[in-house]
Image (spheres, rainbow, N blue to C red):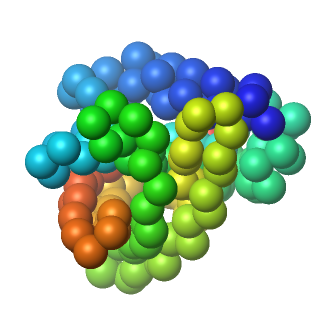
Amino acid sequence: MGRLALVLLTACLSVTAVAADAIKGERKEVFGDTTVHYNTFNSTFLTPDIAKAAELTRSKNQGVINISVLKDGKPQMAQVSGTVKDLTSQSVNLNFKQITEQGAIYYIAQYPVDQQETRTFDIKVQTGDKINTINFNQELFPGE
C-alpha cells in the first residue's frame, strides 16, 4: 500500500502538470493551522494495480477526487464528505474512503464523467469540532 500513496500523489502532480491551463498552481485551502490539498483527475491516470489496491474503478468515465489534510504540516485525520454538481444542478454524493499508509492519509472518492463539462465540487472537511468548506469548479473530460 505504500506504493499507492506515492502513485496517488504522483497522479495528482502529473494531472496538475498536464492540465496547467485548467489548474493554476497548487490546489489547496488554508484554514488556520490546517491545510487541505485537493485534486481531481480521470481514473485512467491510475495503473490497474493501483486502482485495484485502492478499490477504485478504472474507467474513462470515472473521475477521482483526492483530498489530504495537514495540520502544522503533518497528516491529519478528518471526516470528508461532499457532492459534485453538473450544469443542470444534478448532484452526486461523493463517498470518500480513507487510505492510511506510511505516514500519509488520503481521502478518495469517485464520480461519473460522461461528457466534457464543468462541474462544481462542494467538499466539507471536519477536523475535531471545526468544519471547513471548499468549493471549486473543474472542467472534466472523459478519459481516452
**In this view, 129 is above or below 20:** below
The residue under the point 47% across, 56% down is 77
Nearer the observer, 102 or 65: 102
Residue 130's place in the image compared with 57, above or below, is below
Q: Quadrant of residue 112?
A: bottom right
Q: Quadrant of the N terminus?
A: top right
Q: Residue furthest bottom?
A: 90
Q: Which of 106 and 142 is in front in this view?
A: 106
Q: Position of residue 84 (x, y in %)?
A: 39, 69
Q: Find residue 47 and report its horizontal and vertical position in percent.
A: 78, 31
- Give the quarter of the figure containing the C terminus: top right
| Residue nearer the viewer, 82 or 34 | 34
Count of residue discs: 0
Q: Left or right: where does residue 80 sit relative to residue 49?
A: left
Tell me: residue 51, above or below residue 25.
below
Question: Who's the residue at 59% across and 34% down the image?
Answer: 103
Instruction: Tell me, yes or no, if residue 35 can be seen here.
Output: yes
Question: Is residue 86 something one can see in this rendering?
Answer: no
Instruction: Relative to 127, say whether 25 is above or below.
Output: above
Location of residue 123 in the rendering, given as x and y in whole percent from the top left corner: 33, 65
Q: Residue at x 43, y 49 (%)?
A: 76
Q: Which residue is drawn at 56% across and 65% down?
A: 96
- Residue 50 image position (x, y, % from top left): 79, 36
